[in-house]
Every structure is written in C-alpha cells, then in structure tokens.
Image (tube, rainbow, N blue to C red):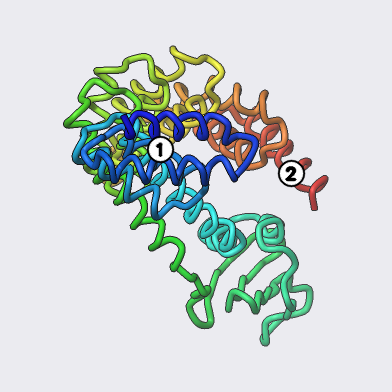
Amino acid sequence: GTWGRLFNEGVEAINKAIDSSANVDKAITAFTMATVVMPESVMTRRNLGLAYYRKEDIPNAIVNLTIAFEKGKDLLACKLLGRIYLDHGNELRTKFTEAHREVFASIKNLESLHEKMKAIDVKYLLGNPSEVNKPTKAKKGDTKEEWKYNQHNLVVSVDGEIVTAIKYTTPYAPKIDSTDYKASLVEFNGAVDIMKKGLIMFPEDAEISENLMNAYIGASRNDEARVLLAERVRKYPDSKFDHYNLGVFLLKDSSYSEAIEQFKNALKIDSTFSAAVYNIAATYVNWGVADQERVKAAGKEGDVSYKERYKMALPYLEKIVQDKKDDIQMWELLGQVYANLNMQDKAVQAYDKADAIRKGKN
C-alpha cells in the first residue's frame, strides 16, 4: 500500500543521507507523507524524528521523537531524545566554563592564600604584584613589604619570605554571566524527565540508567544521583565510573572509609585509573586532618592515632608524584604528610623539589 511505499522510500533516502542533504530532505518528505497516511505508526514518527536529527533541525526532531517515545514507548526515540538534551546541556556547560576559566582559576588561587605561607607562592599563584610598598612605619633593615594586587582589591603583607596578613580593601566579586549555566540546567532537567520515563519503560537498560545519572549530576540534583548511584553499583558492579562518582559524593560527606572503599573498587576494575588513586590519597589526608583537629579540640594532645591515616595516604601520594613529576601541589602535600609523620629528611626533599619546579616555572 501507499504507507509501505512511502516508508520504504524514506528508509532508502535516510540510508543514502550520509553523502547528501538532498536525501535527508527526501526522507523527511516521504516520512511526513507516511505519517499522514498512517498517523498511528510509531516507526514512521521515530524515523521522521531521526531524519530531522540528521538535518540538525532539533526542534522538529524533538517533536516527532517525543510522539514516538511517549505514545509508542519506542526505545530508540527515548535514547536519541536523551542524547539531544544531554549533548546540548554539556555544550552550554562547557561554553560557560570556558568563558569563565580565568575567573574560576583566580578564585581558586585566592582561596589557597593563607598566613604563614611562603611569599614566593603568592607570586606563583597570582603573578607579580601591581605595586610593592614599604609599610609607613618601616624601621631600617626592616624586611616588611606590602604587595598590592589591584585587580583583586588585595593587599598581601610580607615579612622576608613569609606572608603575615591577607587583606581585601573591598571584597573581590568578579563578573560571572550565568546565562549559559542556567540554560544548561534546563537541558539537563529535560534529559532527567525523558530518562526517568524511559527507565520506567525499560528498567533493565543500562544506557538509559547511565544517562539519567549524568543528567542528575548535570542538573545538580545530587540526592537523586546518589540514590541511583547506590543502585547502579549493585546492578553494574564492573562500572568503574559509578564506584568513582559514589566515592566523590561520600568524600564530600566526610564518609571517609566508605569513600575509600568505592575508590578502591574503581581501582580494582582499572588499575591505571589515576583519578581514583588521587582521591584515595586525598581522602586519607582529609581523614587525617579531621582526626587531628578532633583530638586537638578534645584536648588529647598525646593521641597520635591520626598519623595512621597519613601513613595510609603515603603510597598513593608517592605513586602520584612518580607519574606526575612536575605537580607542585602534590610535592607540597607529600612534604606535609612526611612532616606529620616526623620523616623530616623526606619532608625537606619534597619541599625542595616543589621549590625547584617552581623556580623552573617562574
């Protein structure tokens, strides 16, 4: 009949569409006519949506794929719709991140300034100051200086090699245009809606579940992401990213031992997964710091059980600096851990290494 002929014409045209846009238009015409002849055909709707997707006419692709998915429970339409929303969300998020890369780097660098740090590190993080002044009541032979960073409304007081104070003349509030970020949330939430419906229709489909998780994370719906992740690590125990992502959430909650378990699970699946190695080290160090502060607050100065955590971090940190020999922050962290474990010689070596890299880079 007519529908069969039109449908086959559309399929033939879409199969040839790789080499010409004329064929995509031909397919769109054939499938559009076929939907008129047989409006209830799910396959026609899905293929019409697919043809529009190939033409990069996303609004019309969405209309037709949505009909195929919602009315016809079509798996391919569901996956393609999810991909459209996720891709667009990621595109907007990347655009936002790229546009604000320098601003975010500045904020991160300013957050790592603290009293008693080495003055040279300030220059390493922020570059040379806009101006250097001696304090008004400077005595002869005084090594005190004030470094002004006008673009950050910042004055750093330095005495010799050490920072003595950090002061903002007015708060540093860089301009952030969140238009693309907000638009990306709309797309990620759109993906969540599609994938949630899809998961009810196709509960065993691993790809839909994974895309739902990525959509939750993109939309900052962290509670829902966590519930799904906990489910996924049971259902797909060989997915290293699920263990890793669950570990990141647990670390944010200060659930140190549970976080380490998940990162180690990820490492069992892929022993070269460097982000997991890094996060095991970071978790042990954070755990050590938390224990150390708790002991101090309780006035139990003699309790050095926290050192066990630092000891556990060591092999992971040593592996990281072997693989990333020029990572200043890692060498300094390693130095800190050695110092906490009273391994003074090794601590000095690690700090010297950090200084040597810094001088090479400055």
167 left or right, relative to 328: left
> Which numbered tag is attached to residue 286?
1
Q: Residue furthest right?
A: 360
Q: At x 45% / y 50%, what residue is drawn?
A: 88
Disc 1/disc 2 C-alpha distance (Å): 24 Å
State which quadrant residue 346 falls in: top right
Q: At x 22% / y 26%, what residue is drawn?
A: 202
Query: SS at mark 2?
Result: helix
Q: Can residue 291 be seen by looking at this rendering?
A: no
Mark 1 surroundings: few (<14), some (14-19) or many (≥20) residues within 10 A: some
Q: Is residue 53 above or below residue 287?
A: below
Query: SS at mark 1?
Result: helix
Nearer-the-camera pick, 144 or 216: 216
Hey, what amino acid is under mark 1? Asn
Q: Earlier in the sequence, mark 1 or mark 2?
A: 1
Q: Is residue 223 above or below residue 175?
A: above
Hey, what amino acid is under mark 2? Asp
Q: Position of residue 164 (x, y in %)?
A: 58, 66
Q: Is residue 59 above or below residue 225?
A: below
Nearer-the-camera pick, 220 or 319: 220
Q: At x 67% / y 41%, what residue is drawn?
A: 328
119 left or right, relative to 179: right
Mark 2 surroundings: few (<14), some (14-19) or many (≥20) residues within 10 A: some
Q: At x 80% / y 53%, what residue is drawn?
A: 362
Q: Which residue is mark 2?
A: 355
Q: Position of residue 300 (x, y in %)?
A: 28, 38
Count every numbered label the image shows and give the total.
Answer: 2
